[in-house]
């Protein structure tokens, strides 16, 4: 587009164009002219900032905080250098505390491949309500509630916790976050240190949970007993990859009267009879995923026939068709 045509556009449209640009290109636009530099400073452009495609450094984040993120930031996505040859600390305690103080509306943090082992949890911004960690390292003492000497408003109250392939995440971490009583959504994937014992300890503290995903976790029949007993408000449950789950534990989920979605992908220890009987006891169930359970088309159609108000999904690969009615 010719420069004279761009200059004729109103600020509102130029802001929309800048919003669609990656942060690096957006910052480059500030060098075009004084008008563009003013627009790049607009706080609306920096509310939701995605930096995952860049090699981040602490110096760069400090620069962004001082010049663009301060007072504006709502969501931050970033990638660390955990698997780089030259490892650098990206999120220092001072930087995290500065984000908390200077960005009071900062509520969603998503980190990938970041080493957080030197970062105390009490340095996390207290405004956070959603925390996502993928392929990160965390210290053993994370998620601990503050002691009585700390003001409650100075500690994050996480409502949505998403942990994917974080090897250190353990039963103790689960107990720590559950004890805060704020979780509404908990998604754990490839967290092999989380076991039936961890679910037993945490479940009584997760009565307000509405969405639970335990994909590829080390759990079995005992976990479903405590889920069914204590998590009565669940609307979404994903136990995909629970190879130890059998017909003994599945019926424990029949008490989840509010359950709308149940995912049992690759749960190969279940019989079609147990699946049908359990799901028939769930009055609000709308979606059932039985992909990669080993059920053939005939068996899947029989399950679907027994669940007329529920969509049954069953695929053996990503290219297979859904079985729906």
Image (tube, rainbow, N blue to C red):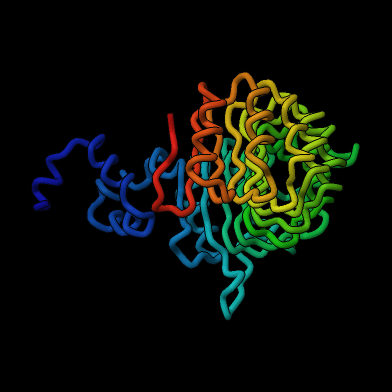
- Name which residue lies at 49% across and 35% down: 301
Left or right, 181 with reference to 211: right
- The residue sitting at the bottom extreme is 85
- Name which residue lies at 73% across and 50% down: 123
Count of numbered labels shown in the rendering: 0
- Name which residue lies at 71% across and 62% down: 167
Q: Is residue 216 above or below residue 107?
A: below
- Name which residue lies at 63% across and 47% down: 240
Q: Quadrant of residue 226?
A: top right
Left or right, 47 with reference to 176: left
Residue 142, position in %: x, y? Answer: 78, 52
- The residue sitting at the front extreme is 298
Residue 162, position in %: x, y? Answer: 63, 46
Is residue 98 visible in this depiction of the protein? no
Residue 253, position in %: x, y? Answer: 73, 31
Q: Is residue 321 above or below residue 32?
A: above
Left or right, 47 with reference to 26: right
Is residue 307 visible in this depiction of the protein? yes
Instruction: Work out whether residue 197 or residue 297 is closer to the camera in this orientation and state it.
Output: 297
Q: Quadrant of residue 85?
A: bottom right
Q: Quadrant of the C terminus?
A: top left
Instruction: Work out whether residue 44 or residue 200 is closer to the camera in this orientation and state it.
Output: 200
Instruction: Work out whether residue 129 or residue 58 is closer to the camera in this orientation and state it.
Output: 129
Left or right, 245 with reference to 307: right
- The residue sitting at the right extreme is 148
Residue 254, position in %: x, y? Answer: 72, 27
């Amino acid at each position: 587009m010719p420069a004279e045509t761009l200059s004729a556009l109103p600020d509102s449209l130029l802001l929309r164009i800048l919003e669609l640009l990656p942060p690096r290109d957006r910052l480059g636009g500030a060098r075009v002219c004084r008008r563009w530099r003013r627009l790049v400073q607009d706080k609306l452009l920096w509310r939701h900032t995605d930096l995952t495609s860049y090699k981040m450094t602490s110096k760069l984040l400090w620069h962004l905080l001082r010049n663009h993120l301060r007072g504006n930031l709502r969501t931050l996505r970033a990638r660390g250098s955990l698997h780089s040859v030259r490892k650098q600390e990206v999120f220092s305690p001072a930087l995290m505390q500065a984000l908390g103080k200077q960005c009071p509306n900062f509520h969603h943090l998503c980190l990938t491949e970041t080493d957080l082992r030197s970062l105390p949890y009490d340095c996390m911004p207290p405004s956070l309500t959603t925390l996502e960690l993928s392929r990160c390292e965390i210290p053993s003492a994370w998620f601990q509630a503050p002691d009585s000497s700390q003001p409650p408003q100075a500690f994050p109250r996480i409502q949505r916790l998403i942990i994917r392939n974080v090897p250190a995440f353990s039963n103790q971490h689960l107990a720590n976050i559950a004890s805060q009583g704020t979780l509404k959504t908990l998604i754990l994937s490839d967290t092999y240190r989380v076991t039936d014992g961890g679910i037993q300890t945490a479940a009584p503290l997760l009565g307000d949970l509405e969405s639970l995903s335990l994909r590829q976790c080390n759990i079995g029949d005992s976990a479903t007993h405590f889920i069914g007993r204590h998590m009565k408000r669940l609307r979404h449950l994903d136990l995909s990859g629970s190879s130890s789950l059998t017909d003994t534990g599945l019926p424990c989920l029949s008490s989840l009267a509010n359950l709308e979605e149940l995912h049992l992908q690759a749960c190969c220890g279940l019989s079609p009879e147990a699946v049908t009987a359990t799901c028939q006891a769930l009055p609000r169930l709308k979606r059932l995923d039985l992909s990669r359970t080993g059920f053939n088309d005939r068996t899947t159609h029989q399950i679907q026939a027994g669940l007329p108000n529920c969509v049954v999904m069953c695929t053996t690969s990503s290219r297979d068709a859904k079985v729906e009615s």
